[in-house]
Image (tube, helix red, strand yellow):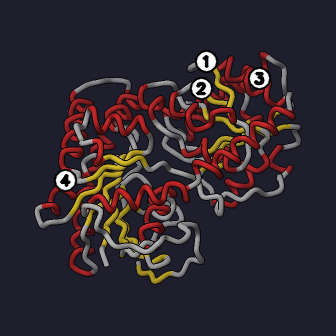
Amino acid sequence: MRRVLILVENLPSPFDRRVWQEACTLRDAGYAVSIVCPTGPGCELKFEVIDAIYVYRYRLPLEASSAAGYALEYASAIVQTFILSWRVLLTRGFDVVHACNPPDLLVLVAGFFKLFGKKFLFDHHDLAPELYEAKFGRRDFLYRLMLRLERLTFRAADVSIATNESYRQVAIARGRMAPERVFVVRSGPDLARLKRLAPDERLKCGRRYLVGYVGVMGRQEGVDYLLRAVQHIVFGLHRCDIQFGLVGGGTSLQQMKSFAADLGVAEFVTFTGRVPDRELLAMLNTADVCVNPDIANEMNDKSTMNKVMEYMALGKPIVQFDLTEGRFSAQQASLYARRNDAVDFAGKIVELLDDPARRAAMGAFGRRRVAEHLEWRHEAPRLLAAYDALWGGSAPRRVPGSAGSRLRSRESST
Protein backbone atom coordinates (compact mmCIF):
# COMPACT_ATOMS: atom_id res chain seq x y z
CA MET A 1 0.00 0.00 0.00
CA ARG A 2 1.39 3.41 -0.94
CA ARG A 3 1.13 6.18 1.61
CA VAL A 4 0.28 9.86 1.12
CA LEU A 5 0.90 12.84 3.39
CA ILE A 6 -1.25 15.86 2.49
CA LEU A 7 -0.11 19.27 3.76
CA VAL A 8 -2.55 22.19 3.85
CA GLU A 9 -2.25 25.47 5.76
CA ASN A 10 -5.14 27.79 4.98
CA LEU A 11 -8.09 25.60 6.05
CA PRO A 12 -8.65 22.65 8.38
CA SER A 13 -9.73 19.22 7.19
CA PRO A 14 -12.35 18.03 6.56
CA PHE A 15 -13.65 21.63 6.23
CA ASP A 16 -11.49 22.18 3.11
CA ARG A 17 -13.78 20.42 0.64
CA ARG A 18 -11.28 20.03 -2.21
CA VAL A 19 -8.64 18.50 0.05
CA TRP A 20 -11.16 16.19 1.69
CA GLN A 21 -12.50 14.98 -1.66
CA GLU A 22 -8.93 14.30 -2.78
CA ALA A 23 -8.17 12.44 0.43
CA CYS A 24 -11.29 10.28 0.13
CA THR A 25 -10.57 9.50 -3.51
CA LEU A 26 -7.03 8.41 -2.68
CA ARG A 27 -8.24 6.32 0.26
CA ASP A 28 -10.83 4.61 -1.95
CA ALA A 29 -8.09 3.88 -4.51
CA GLY A 30 -6.06 2.01 -1.88
CA TYR A 31 -3.72 4.68 -0.56
CA ALA A 32 -3.08 5.23 3.16
CA VAL A 33 -3.78 8.93 3.69
CA SER A 34 -2.59 11.31 6.42
CA ILE A 35 -3.31 15.06 6.55
CA VAL A 36 -1.44 17.80 8.42
CA CYS A 37 -3.47 21.01 8.71
CA PRO A 38 -4.44 23.79 11.15
CA THR A 39 -7.29 23.64 13.64
CA GLY A 40 -10.45 25.68 13.06
CA PRO A 41 -14.10 25.97 14.11
CA GLY A 42 -15.52 22.47 14.33
CA CYS A 43 -12.03 21.01 13.82
CA GLU A 44 -10.40 21.74 17.18
CA LEU A 45 -8.97 18.30 18.02
CA LYS A 46 -5.23 17.89 17.53
CA PHE A 47 -5.67 14.34 16.19
CA GLU A 48 -8.57 12.44 14.64
CA VAL A 49 -9.16 9.41 12.46
CA ILE A 50 -12.12 10.16 10.20
CA ASP A 51 -13.23 7.42 7.80
CA ALA A 52 -9.74 5.84 7.92
CA ILE A 53 -8.01 9.16 7.13
CA TYR A 54 -5.56 10.28 9.83
CA VAL A 55 -5.79 14.04 10.52
CA TYR A 56 -3.05 15.81 12.51
CA ARG A 57 -3.74 19.45 13.40
CA TYR A 58 -1.81 22.38 14.87
CA ARG A 59 -2.96 25.71 16.26
CA LEU A 60 -2.03 28.94 14.48
CA PRO A 61 -1.08 31.97 16.60
CA LEU A 62 -3.48 34.30 14.76
CA GLU A 63 -5.69 34.80 11.69
CA ALA A 64 -3.46 37.14 9.72
CA SER A 65 -4.65 40.27 7.93
CA SER A 66 -1.34 42.14 7.42
CA ALA A 67 1.94 41.26 5.74
CA ALA A 68 3.64 41.01 9.15
CA GLY A 69 0.77 38.85 10.42
CA TYR A 70 1.09 36.47 7.47
CA ALA A 71 4.84 36.19 8.08
CA LEU A 72 4.17 35.13 11.68
CA GLU A 73 1.33 32.79 10.71
CA TYR A 74 3.33 31.09 7.95
CA ALA A 75 6.48 30.75 10.05
CA SER A 76 4.51 29.04 12.80
CA ALA A 77 2.67 26.84 10.30
CA ILE A 78 5.86 25.66 8.57
CA VAL A 79 7.58 24.76 11.84
CA GLN A 80 4.55 22.87 13.16
CA THR A 81 3.95 21.18 9.79
CA PHE A 82 7.55 19.98 9.73
CA ILE A 83 7.30 18.56 13.26
CA LEU A 84 4.00 16.79 12.55
CA SER A 85 5.34 15.45 9.24
CA TRP A 86 8.14 13.75 11.19
CA ARG A 87 5.50 12.31 13.53
CA VAL A 88 3.65 10.84 10.57
CA LEU A 89 6.87 9.52 9.02
CA LEU A 90 7.89 7.73 12.21
CA THR A 91 4.44 6.27 12.95
CA ARG A 92 2.54 5.68 9.70
CA GLY A 93 5.12 6.60 7.09
CA PHE A 94 4.56 8.21 3.69
CA ASP A 95 5.85 7.82 0.14
CA VAL A 96 4.63 11.11 -1.32
CA VAL A 97 4.12 14.61 0.05
CA HIS A 98 1.01 16.23 -1.46
CA ALA A 99 1.45 19.93 -0.63
CA CYS A 100 -1.42 22.38 -1.15
CA ASN A 101 -0.61 26.08 -1.36
CA PRO A 102 -0.83 28.81 -0.12
CA PRO A 103 1.82 29.32 1.13
CA ASP A 104 4.43 28.17 -1.37
CA LEU A 105 6.73 27.85 1.67
CA LEU A 106 5.48 24.27 1.97
CA VAL A 107 8.13 23.43 -0.63
CA LEU A 108 10.64 23.68 2.23
CA VAL A 109 8.98 20.72 3.95
CA ALA A 110 8.33 18.71 0.80
CA GLY A 111 11.82 19.44 -0.55
CA PHE A 112 13.44 18.23 2.67
CA PHE A 113 11.68 14.88 2.51
CA LYS A 114 12.64 14.50 -1.16
CA LEU A 115 16.18 14.08 0.16
CA PHE A 116 14.92 10.80 1.68
CA GLY A 117 13.44 9.58 -1.60
CA LYS A 118 9.88 10.82 -1.10
CA LYS A 119 7.88 12.05 -4.10
CA PHE A 120 6.45 15.59 -4.19
CA LEU A 121 3.07 16.41 -5.74
CA PHE A 122 2.20 20.12 -5.77
CA ASP A 123 -1.52 20.92 -5.53
CA HIS A 124 -1.73 24.47 -6.91
CA HIS A 125 -4.74 26.08 -5.19
CA ASP A 126 -3.83 29.79 -5.48
CA LEU A 127 -1.56 32.07 -7.47
CA ALA A 128 0.40 33.21 -4.41
CA PRO A 129 2.10 36.28 -6.01
CA GLU A 130 -1.20 37.50 -7.45
CA LEU A 131 -2.96 36.76 -4.15
CA TYR A 132 -0.44 38.94 -2.33
CA GLU A 133 -0.95 41.75 -4.87
CA ALA A 134 -4.74 41.45 -4.55
CA LYS A 135 -4.57 41.67 -0.74
CA PHE A 136 -2.00 44.46 -0.40
CA GLY A 137 -2.02 46.26 -3.76
CA ARG A 138 1.73 46.28 -4.36
CA ARG A 139 4.56 44.46 -6.11
CA ASP A 140 7.41 44.83 -3.64
CA PHE A 141 10.16 42.62 -2.24
CA LEU A 142 7.63 40.14 -0.80
CA TYR A 143 5.87 39.85 -4.18
CA ARG A 144 9.20 39.06 -5.85
CA LEU A 145 10.02 36.59 -3.09
CA MET A 146 6.75 34.79 -3.76
CA LEU A 147 7.60 34.51 -7.45
CA ARG A 148 10.89 32.88 -6.49
CA LEU A 149 9.19 30.49 -4.08
CA GLU A 150 6.66 29.60 -6.77
CA ARG A 151 9.47 28.81 -9.23
CA LEU A 152 11.25 26.73 -6.59
CA THR A 153 8.03 24.81 -5.90
CA PHE A 154 7.46 23.94 -9.54
CA ARG A 155 11.14 22.99 -9.96
CA ALA A 156 11.01 20.65 -6.96
CA ALA A 157 7.64 19.05 -7.78
CA ASP A 158 7.59 15.67 -9.51
CA VAL A 159 4.00 16.33 -10.62
CA SER A 160 1.73 19.36 -10.31
CA ILE A 161 -2.06 19.48 -10.38
CA ALA A 162 -3.84 22.69 -11.41
CA THR A 163 -7.40 23.72 -10.65
CA ASN A 164 -7.99 24.93 -14.23
CA GLU A 165 -6.31 25.52 -17.59
CA SER A 166 -5.17 29.02 -16.61
CA TYR A 167 -3.23 27.61 -13.67
CA ARG A 168 -1.83 24.85 -15.87
CA GLN A 169 -0.41 27.47 -18.22
CA VAL A 170 1.21 29.24 -15.26
CA ALA A 171 2.88 25.96 -14.27
CA ILE A 172 4.16 25.42 -17.80
CA ALA A 173 5.12 29.00 -18.75
CA ARG A 174 6.15 30.57 -15.45
CA GLY A 175 7.06 27.38 -13.58
CA ARG A 176 8.73 25.73 -16.61
CA MET A 177 7.21 22.36 -15.83
CA ALA A 178 6.96 19.78 -18.60
CA PRO A 179 3.34 19.79 -19.89
CA GLU A 180 3.00 16.05 -19.37
CA ARG A 181 3.71 16.54 -15.64
CA VAL A 182 0.88 19.04 -15.11
CA PHE A 183 -2.67 17.72 -14.67
CA VAL A 184 -5.90 19.73 -14.44
CA VAL A 185 -8.02 18.55 -11.49
CA ARG A 186 -10.91 20.93 -10.97
CA SER A 187 -12.58 21.46 -7.59
CA GLY A 188 -15.80 19.79 -8.62
CA PRO A 189 -18.74 19.90 -6.21
CA ASP A 190 -20.15 16.78 -4.60
CA LEU A 191 -23.86 16.45 -5.40
CA ALA A 192 -24.26 14.00 -2.50
CA ARG A 193 -23.39 16.85 -0.11
CA LEU A 194 -25.03 19.75 -1.96
CA LYS A 195 -28.61 18.64 -1.53
CA ARG A 196 -31.52 20.66 -2.85
CA LEU A 197 -33.92 21.39 -0.01
CA ALA A 198 -37.19 23.24 0.48
CA PRO A 199 -36.72 27.00 0.99
CA ASP A 200 -36.75 28.43 4.52
CA GLU A 201 -38.87 31.55 4.08
CA ARG A 202 -37.75 32.92 7.45
CA LEU A 203 -34.37 33.72 5.88
CA LYS A 204 -36.05 36.31 3.65
CA CYS A 205 -36.86 38.41 6.73
CA GLY A 206 -40.33 39.18 5.41
CA ARG A 207 -39.15 40.28 1.96
CA ARG A 208 -40.14 38.78 -1.38
CA TYR A 209 -36.69 37.74 -2.63
CA LEU A 210 -33.40 36.48 -1.23
CA VAL A 211 -29.99 36.91 -2.87
CA GLY A 212 -27.36 34.48 -1.56
CA TYR A 213 -23.59 34.67 -1.22
CA VAL A 214 -21.13 32.19 0.29
CA GLY A 215 -17.42 32.85 0.64
CA VAL A 216 -14.62 34.42 2.58
CA MET A 217 -15.05 37.98 3.84
CA GLY A 218 -11.76 39.36 2.55
CA ARG A 219 -10.51 42.23 0.44
CA GLN A 220 -10.23 40.42 -2.90
CA GLU A 221 -13.66 38.78 -2.56
CA GLY A 222 -15.43 42.02 -3.49
CA VAL A 223 -18.04 41.98 -0.72
CA ASP A 224 -17.73 45.78 -0.63
CA TYR A 225 -18.82 45.88 -4.28
CA LEU A 226 -21.80 43.70 -3.41
CA LEU A 227 -22.78 46.07 -0.59
CA ARG A 228 -22.52 49.05 -2.95
CA ALA A 229 -24.82 47.13 -5.31
CA VAL A 230 -27.27 46.63 -2.42
CA GLN A 231 -27.20 50.38 -1.76
CA HIS A 232 -27.98 51.11 -5.41
CA ILE A 233 -30.82 48.56 -5.43
CA VAL A 234 -32.41 50.03 -2.28
CA PHE A 235 -31.86 53.76 -2.83
CA GLY A 236 -31.23 54.04 -6.58
CA LEU A 237 -33.76 51.51 -7.89
CA HIS A 238 -36.10 51.85 -4.86
CA ARG A 239 -36.38 48.11 -4.37
CA CYS A 240 -37.01 47.24 -0.73
CA ASP A 241 -38.30 43.73 -1.40
CA ILE A 242 -34.91 41.99 -1.50
CA GLN A 243 -32.92 40.50 1.39
CA PHE A 244 -29.24 39.56 1.01
CA GLY A 245 -27.85 36.55 2.89
CA LEU A 246 -24.04 36.52 3.19
CA VAL A 247 -22.52 33.30 4.54
CA GLY A 248 -18.87 33.15 5.56
CA GLY A 249 -16.23 34.42 7.94
CA GLY A 250 -12.88 36.07 7.50
CA THR A 251 -10.69 38.95 8.56
CA SER A 252 -13.00 41.56 6.97
CA LEU A 253 -16.31 40.35 8.43
CA GLN A 254 -16.67 43.09 11.04
CA GLN A 255 -15.45 45.68 8.56
CA MET A 256 -18.12 44.63 6.06
CA LYS A 257 -20.83 44.79 8.74
CA SER A 258 -19.73 48.34 9.54
CA PHE A 259 -19.63 49.22 5.86
CA ALA A 260 -23.21 47.99 5.39
CA ALA A 261 -24.28 50.22 8.28
CA ASP A 262 -22.40 53.19 6.80
CA LEU A 263 -24.20 52.65 3.49
CA GLY A 264 -27.56 52.52 5.27
CA VAL A 265 -28.38 48.97 4.13
CA ALA A 266 -27.67 46.91 7.27
CA GLU A 267 -31.32 45.90 7.64
CA PHE A 268 -31.26 44.39 4.13
CA VAL A 269 -28.17 42.25 4.75
CA THR A 270 -27.83 39.16 6.93
CA PHE A 271 -24.25 38.26 7.88
CA THR A 272 -24.14 34.71 9.27
CA GLY A 273 -20.39 34.30 9.76
CA ARG A 274 -18.98 30.81 9.27
CA VAL A 275 -21.77 28.27 9.79
CA PRO A 276 -22.26 24.48 9.49
CA ASP A 277 -23.22 23.01 6.13
CA ARG A 278 -26.90 22.70 7.04
CA GLU A 279 -27.20 26.47 7.58
CA LEU A 280 -25.20 27.25 4.45
CA LEU A 281 -27.44 24.94 2.41
CA ALA A 282 -30.56 26.48 3.91
CA MET A 283 -29.46 29.94 2.78
CA LEU A 284 -28.48 28.87 -0.73
CA ASN A 285 -31.57 26.71 -1.26
CA THR A 286 -33.77 29.64 -0.25
CA ALA A 287 -31.96 32.13 -2.49
CA ASP A 288 -33.64 33.19 -5.73
CA VAL A 289 -30.32 34.40 -7.17
CA CYS A 290 -26.74 33.79 -6.02
CA VAL A 291 -23.84 36.17 -6.53
CA ASN A 292 -20.08 36.10 -6.95
CA PRO A 293 -18.75 39.66 -6.57
CA ASP A 294 -15.04 38.71 -6.81
CA ILE A 295 -13.05 41.75 -7.91
CA ALA A 296 -11.73 41.69 -11.47
CA ASN A 297 -7.97 41.39 -11.05
CA GLU A 298 -5.24 39.14 -12.37
CA MET A 299 -5.70 36.52 -9.68
CA ASN A 300 -9.48 36.24 -9.76
CA ASP A 301 -9.54 36.26 -13.57
CA LYS A 302 -7.44 33.07 -13.62
CA SER A 303 -9.03 31.36 -10.59
CA THR A 304 -11.96 28.97 -10.41
CA MET A 305 -14.26 29.85 -7.51
CA ASN A 306 -15.83 26.92 -5.67
CA LYS A 307 -18.89 28.99 -4.79
CA VAL A 308 -19.84 29.37 -8.45
CA MET A 309 -20.00 25.62 -8.96
CA GLU A 310 -21.81 25.13 -5.65
CA TYR A 311 -24.46 27.62 -6.77
CA MET A 312 -24.79 25.70 -10.04
CA ALA A 313 -25.02 22.36 -8.22
CA LEU A 314 -28.06 23.72 -6.35
CA GLY A 315 -29.66 24.96 -9.57
CA LYS A 316 -29.26 28.68 -8.80
CA PRO A 317 -28.85 31.41 -11.43
CA ILE A 318 -25.80 33.58 -10.85
CA VAL A 319 -24.62 37.16 -11.22
CA GLN A 320 -20.88 37.81 -11.32
CA PHE A 321 -18.30 40.11 -12.88
CA ASP A 322 -17.04 39.02 -16.29
CA LEU A 323 -13.94 36.93 -15.45
CA THR A 324 -12.28 34.32 -17.66
CA GLU A 325 -12.55 31.25 -15.43
CA GLY A 326 -15.87 32.35 -13.91
CA ARG A 327 -17.36 32.47 -17.41
CA PHE A 328 -15.84 29.08 -18.29
CA SER A 329 -17.41 27.46 -15.22
CA ALA A 330 -20.88 29.00 -15.34
CA GLN A 331 -21.42 29.70 -19.04
CA GLN A 332 -25.20 30.17 -19.52
CA ALA A 333 -25.92 29.75 -15.80
CA SER A 334 -24.76 33.32 -15.11
CA LEU A 335 -25.23 36.93 -16.10
CA TYR A 336 -21.95 38.88 -16.36
CA ALA A 337 -21.72 42.45 -15.11
CA ARG A 338 -19.09 44.88 -16.31
CA ARG A 339 -15.88 44.43 -14.37
CA ASN A 340 -15.93 46.12 -10.96
CA ASP A 341 -19.12 48.06 -11.79
CA ALA A 342 -21.40 47.83 -8.75
CA VAL A 343 -24.26 49.65 -10.50
CA ASP A 344 -24.27 47.18 -13.41
CA PHE A 345 -24.00 44.33 -10.91
CA ALA A 346 -27.10 45.66 -9.15
CA GLY A 347 -28.96 45.95 -12.43
CA LYS A 348 -28.19 42.35 -13.35
CA ILE A 349 -29.49 41.11 -9.98
CA VAL A 350 -32.78 42.96 -10.38
CA GLU A 351 -33.06 41.87 -14.02
CA LEU A 352 -32.90 38.22 -12.96
CA LEU A 353 -35.25 38.60 -10.00
CA ASP A 354 -37.85 40.10 -12.30
CA ASP A 355 -37.64 37.21 -14.79
CA PRO A 356 -38.57 33.89 -13.08
CA ALA A 357 -38.61 31.93 -16.35
CA ARG A 358 -35.05 32.98 -17.13
CA ARG A 359 -33.96 32.14 -13.59
CA ALA A 360 -35.39 28.65 -13.93
CA ALA A 361 -33.70 28.04 -17.29
CA MET A 362 -30.33 29.28 -16.07
CA GLY A 363 -30.54 27.24 -12.88
CA ALA A 364 -31.41 24.08 -14.82
CA PHE A 365 -28.51 24.64 -17.19
CA GLY A 366 -26.07 25.06 -14.30
CA ARG A 367 -27.28 21.95 -12.49
CA ARG A 368 -27.00 19.93 -15.70
CA ARG A 369 -23.50 21.24 -16.42
CA VAL A 370 -22.30 20.20 -12.97
CA ALA A 371 -23.86 16.75 -13.21
CA GLU A 372 -22.52 16.07 -16.71
CA HIS A 373 -19.12 17.80 -16.64
CA LEU A 374 -17.98 19.42 -13.38
CA GLU A 375 -18.99 17.13 -10.51
CA TRP A 376 -16.11 15.62 -8.51
CA ARG A 377 -16.71 12.13 -9.95
CA HIS A 378 -15.45 13.50 -13.28
CA GLU A 379 -12.29 14.86 -11.63
CA ALA A 380 -11.34 11.89 -9.44
CA PRO A 381 -9.85 9.86 -12.35
CA ARG A 382 -7.66 12.85 -13.25
CA LEU A 383 -6.31 13.01 -9.71
CA LEU A 384 -5.48 9.30 -9.84
CA ALA A 385 -3.81 9.76 -13.24
CA ALA A 386 -1.56 12.42 -11.68
CA TYR A 387 -0.63 9.96 -8.95
CA ASP A 388 0.06 7.24 -11.50
CA ALA A 389 2.48 9.66 -13.19
CA LEU A 390 4.52 9.89 -9.98
CA TRP A 391 5.57 6.29 -10.53
CA GLY A 392 5.60 6.26 -14.30
CA GLY A 393 2.07 4.97 -14.55
CA SER A 394 2.83 1.88 -12.49
CA ALA A 395 0.92 2.62 -9.29
CA PRO A 396 -1.53 -0.20 -8.53
CA ARG A 397 -4.96 0.95 -7.45
CA ARG A 398 -8.52 -0.22 -7.05
CA VAL A 399 -11.37 1.40 -8.89
CA PRO A 400 -12.35 4.26 -6.54
CA GLY A 401 -15.70 4.40 -4.85
CA SER A 402 -17.56 7.54 -3.90
CA ALA A 403 -15.45 10.36 -2.46
CA GLY A 404 -18.53 11.72 -0.79
CA SER A 405 -19.48 11.75 2.84
CA ARG A 406 -19.45 8.45 4.70
CA LEU A 407 -20.68 8.17 8.24
CA ARG A 408 -18.00 9.79 10.35
CA SER A 409 -16.24 7.42 12.75
CA ARG A 410 -13.61 8.94 15.00
CA GLU A 411 -10.62 7.95 17.08
CA SER A 412 -9.50 11.17 18.69
CA SER A 413 -7.21 12.72 21.26
CA THR A 414 -6.58 16.25 22.38
> Which is nearer the N-term, disc 2 or disc 1?
2
> Which is nearer the N-term, disc 1 or disc 3?
3
> Which is nearer the N-term, disc 4 or disc 1?
4
State how far apart marks 4 and 1 are (Cα).
Answer: 41 Å
Q: Quadrant of residue 165?
A: top left
**Secondary structure under badge 1?**
loop
User: Mark 2 and 1 residues: CB-CB less than 8 Å, in contact?
Assistant: yes
Task: Give the crowd class for mark 3: few <14, some 14-19, many >=20 residues within 10 Å.
Answer: many
Residue at image x 72%, y 34%? 266
In this rendering, the label closer to the viewer, 4 or 3: 4
Task: Give the crowd class for mark 4: few <14, some 14-19, many >=20 residues within 10 Å.
Answer: some
To which residue does mark 2 refer? Answer: 321
**Secondary structure under badge 2?**
strand
To which residue does mark 4 refer? Answer: 108
Identity of the amino acid at label 3?
Ile
> Which is nearer the N-term, disc 4 or disc 3?
4
Residue that lies at the very extreme toward the bottom in this rendered image: 411
> Which is nearer the N-term, disc 3 or disc 2?
3
Asked if one can make out residue 210 in the rendered structure from this viewpoint, the answer is yes
User: Mark 3 and 2 residues: CB-CB less than 8 Å, in contact?
Assistant: no
Residue 45 picture location, percent across and down? 44, 72
**Secondary structure under badge 3?**
helix
Residue 338 picture location, percent across and down? 61, 18
Identity of the amino acid at label 4?
Leu
State how far apart marks 3 and 2 are (Cα).
Answer: 17 Å
> Which is nearer the N-term, disc 4 or disc 2?
4
Left or right relative to 19: residue 118: left
**Secondary structure under badge 4?**
helix
In this rendering, the label closer to the viewer, 4 or 1: 1
To which residue does mark 3 refer? Answer: 233
To which residue does mark 1 refer? Answer: 338
